[in-house]
Image (cartoon, grey):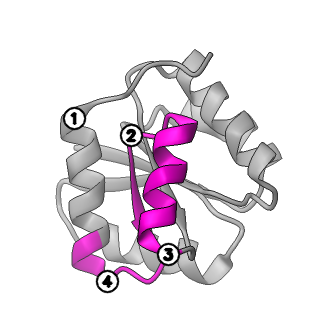
Amino acid sequence: MLRVFIADDSLGFGTLAAAWLEVHDDIEVVGAVRSAAEALEAVVPAAPDVVILDRLLPQPEHSLEVLAHVRRHLPGAAVLLVSGMPDDELGQEAARTGADGHVSKAANAEALTQAVRRVAARGPGPAPS
């Protein structure tokens, strides 16, 4: 079972992403939060395989704090960065921050599911310095 945690301040995206992922028998959404503070408190006990992390939660530095927390406390978890920014910019941001992958919030259910599976299969990247 692939365990997914969603940290996104957009109620619409978080709810939709959870619904899209949970139709798959091998994916379980183990948490969904709307702030960095909630993510910092809930992500470790949830023990996800993949963290879907909004690039702006609501500020970029909040997302970086959550990413660093995941790397420190959940070294086996992969991080998938999501945003409404253009895909090429999001890819550069994901690489710069040390996220394991990225997907646009405009992605459909299939693209989101594929991105989650791709980062889960690849595993986590190095801890940010």
Between disc 1 and disc 4, whose residue precedes? 4
| Residue type indicated by callout 3 | Pro
Residue corresponding to mark 4: 108
Residue 96 sits in quarter: top right
Q: Are marks 4 and 3 in contact (CB under 8 Å)?
A: no
Question: What range of the chain is rendered magenta?
Answer: 86-111
Per the model, the C-alpha gap separating discs 4 and 3 is 15 Å
Between disc 3 and disc 1, whose residue precedes? 3
Mark toward the viewer: 3 or 1: 3
Badge 2: few (under 14), some or many (20 or more) residues near its Cα, within 10 Å?
Answer: many
Per the model, the C-alpha gap separating discs 2 and 1 is 8 Å
Per the model, the C-alpha gap separating discs 1 and 4 is 21 Å
Between disc 2 and disc 3, whose residue precedes? 3
| Residue type indicated by callout 1 | Arg
Badge 1: few (under 14), some or many (20 or more) residues near its Cα, within 10 Å?
Answer: few
- Percent coordinates x, y for residue 56 in the rendering: 71, 60
